[in-house]
Amino acid sequence: MDFHNVDIVLVGTLGSGNLGSVARAMCNMGLAHLKLVSPRCALDEQAFWMATCGEDVLKCAHVFPTLREAIADCSYCFGTTARHRRWRQTLSPRDAAQKTLGLCKTNRVAFVFGPEDSGLTNEELELCHEVITIPTVSSATSLNLSHAVMIICYELFMVTRQQPKTLRSTRLAPVAMTEAMYDHMRTTLFEIGFLNRQNPDYTLGLMRRILTKAKLTIPEARFIRGIFRQLAWYVKSREQKKEVNS
Amino acid sequence: MDFHNVDIVLVGTLGSGNLGSVARAMCNMGLAHLKLVSPRCALDEQAFWMATCGEDVLKCAHVFPTLREAIADCSYCFGTTARHRRWRQTLSPRDAAQKTLGLCKTNRVAFVFGPEDSGLTNEELELCHEVITIPTVSSATSLNLSHAVMIICYELFMVTRQQPKTLRSTRLAPVAMTEAMYDHMRTTLFEIGFLNRQNPDYTLGLMRRILTKAKLTIPEARFIRGIFRQLAWYVKSREQKKEVNS
């Protein structure tokens, strides 16, 4: 799925830096169509500086005098608001994204965001088919404009990645290999005096539990065995030197 | 659930406006603990202007000279990167949030973000238990810093709204303890000739990944360190015997 049928619509934006940040967020998540309704700032240097990869999104942005004109070609519009409106049920960004997936193949869909200071008016929200509220803690419901846009774009991008779950399967080391590794370990840990000859099983059991949790792959089991092989070699070479010296 | 056990850690941040935007995003989603590692900007007027509701988050931010010190009290750290690293599997923000829900009841968990221009270094990512990549289109993988933080905070907030599942939470070894263990390991593996002095990092990195998968508890980290302590003792005692004999 691509998002050629999805518009981000910003109403009465105050900060040109926010325009840039919104363009960058859209670009990161594969959205290209930005509509500006009576912006109260210019597409200036600050906007382009903040846009980075979203420069083209900014350059292609269309400006409209009213929201009604901006969404005239859209078949479904989601308005965003932080305020709880008693008379209307709100949708989560995740549910809205899921809904968009079904709609946008054959319909133009818009996500509408209000000015930084006041949000969308009731009249503007009336023009929208549904209202989204981004979940926040109740004590701080007002999001930065570009953060709000990013969350919507991110959720849209995430629904395109949903697929029937195929579990990634890693090939683990077979028992023959891990047991050979533990045998090697047992011998060497005896040699260096780490294991008590009376009760080595407790210690080896602990080692087993740690490495079982790690779910060793074949190269990893070889690697661990390699450490103990090197250790055995070291012990042996020291013993030989001792014998030569004595 | 609240997030008193979750830290947002920003490394080498360049823009004070970004510090403010991050604080605002955290506040919107109910996170309060911000750690700054050698920030390259001040907590100035611009930072507080961008923070709005996140003013207290900024005021309470702690500054550390190194990442290692910043995460010393954390038992699980997620590093974030846009770059694909062939040798390491990355996690989605959603999966990381789900994992955090289980961990953060009894463990301090950190989310680490690199500087705006370059991201986290490989060395910094090595200190993290797992790596998160935020999904984006492949042509524009670099997110605005505060957008990246917002997506993580938003996903964390979203998991708290899911049906209460009872997740078993184990207390894991903090970074200060595991890093001391790796330091001990490095020294001892050099002694027995397992590590090549030219390129020890590859081998130690492999060891780190195996033990990270194992999610070491405090007694387990002590146990592994005990093996290497015993090994160091063995090496030293052999060297002394050699000297006595020669």
Image (cartoon, coloured by chain):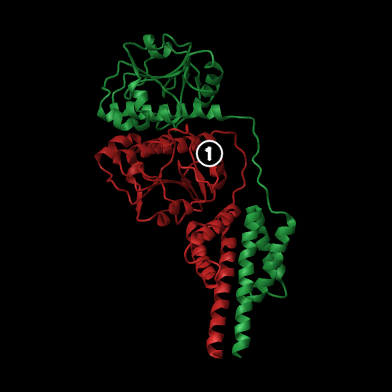
Chain colours: A green, B red
The one nearer the camera, B173 or B245, is B245
Count of numbered circles in the view: 1
Query: Can you name the residue that lies furthest to the right here?
Result: A176
Element type at mark 1: loop
* Image location of residue B125, percent across then percent down: 46, 50
* Image location of residue B211, percent across then percent down: 58, 57
Q: Chain of mark 1?
A: B
The one nearer the camera, B81 or A241, is A241
* Point 64% across, 30% down: residue: A164
* Image location of residue B40, percent across then percent down: 30, 48
User: Residue under circle 1?
Assistant: B92
Q: Is residue A156 above or below residue A35?
A: below
* Residue B180 shown left or right of residue A180 in the figure: left
* Image location of residue B149, percent across then percent down: 42, 39
* Residue A183 shown left or right of residue B47 in the figure: right
* Point 42% across, 33% down: residue: B140
Q: Is residue A83 visible?
A: yes
Q: Is residue A74 above or below residue A138?
A: above
Q: Residues within 10 Å of mark 1 (few under 14, many from 20)?
A: some
The image quadrant of residue A26 is top left
Amino acid carrying label 1: it is Ser
* Residue A166 shown left or right of residue A20 in the figure: right
* Point 50% across, 57% down: residue: B174
